[in-house]
Image (spheres, rainbow, N blue to C red):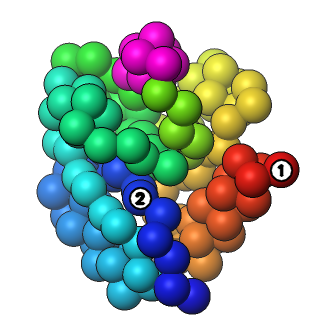
Amino acid sequence: MNNKHAILIVDDERNVRDSLSKWFREDGYDIGTAENAQSALRCLQEKKWDVVLLDIKMPGMDGMELQQRIRDTGTDPTIIFITAHDDPVTRERARSGLAYLQKPFREDALIGAIQQALENRRA
């Protein structure tokens, strides 16, 4: 599937950013990465992103706070939370209208979540 959709990957783990970048570039997506919330906010000022893959547990500003800051910027990317931490309270907050995937996840599950998010945006 050749997509021109832009995906920003925000995760403090380099290996996660690198792996996901590789998966999506091979599928034709336009990819950006950020290692923390501040870097992500800069990326969001520089470009319009269709989807943000957002780690919840990061040093400094966590993904839940960053999600709110993204909404406050007036940009409207679809946010898909990705996390290795299965905290029930965070999971419920993240699921309130947003996609949530627990690491490790299969490539096809993540691709499916992104395709569903993009279809929902078009609807």
Discs 2, 1 touching: Cβ within 8 Å: no
Q: Which residue is mark 2?
A: 6
Q: Residue at x 36, y 31 (%)?
A: 57
User: Considering only order in the chain, which callout, 1 or 2, is on the residue closer to the N terminus?
Assistant: 2
Q: Does residue 79 appear left or right of residue 46 in this picture?
A: right
Q: Does residue 107 appear left or right of residue 47 in this picture?
A: right
Which residue type does callout 1 highlight?
A: Ala
Q: Residue at x 31, y 63 (%)?
A: 31
**Position above or below: 78 against 72:** below
Q: Which residue is mark 1?
A: 123
Residue 73 belongs to the span the image colors magenta: yes
Q: Which residues are magenta?
A: 64-74
Q: Residue at x 35, y 67 (%)?
A: 30
Quarter of the image for residue 28 reads bottom left
Task: Give residue 8's position: percent from left, percent from top.
Answer: 35, 50
Query: Judging from the image, what secondary structure is the residue with disc 1 in?
Result: loop
- Counting other residues with Cα less than 10 Å from the Cα at mark 2, is it few (<14), some (14-19), or many (20 or more)? some
Query: Judging from the image, what secondary structure is the residue with disc 2 in?
Result: strand
Q: In this orientation, does residue 62 appear? A: yes
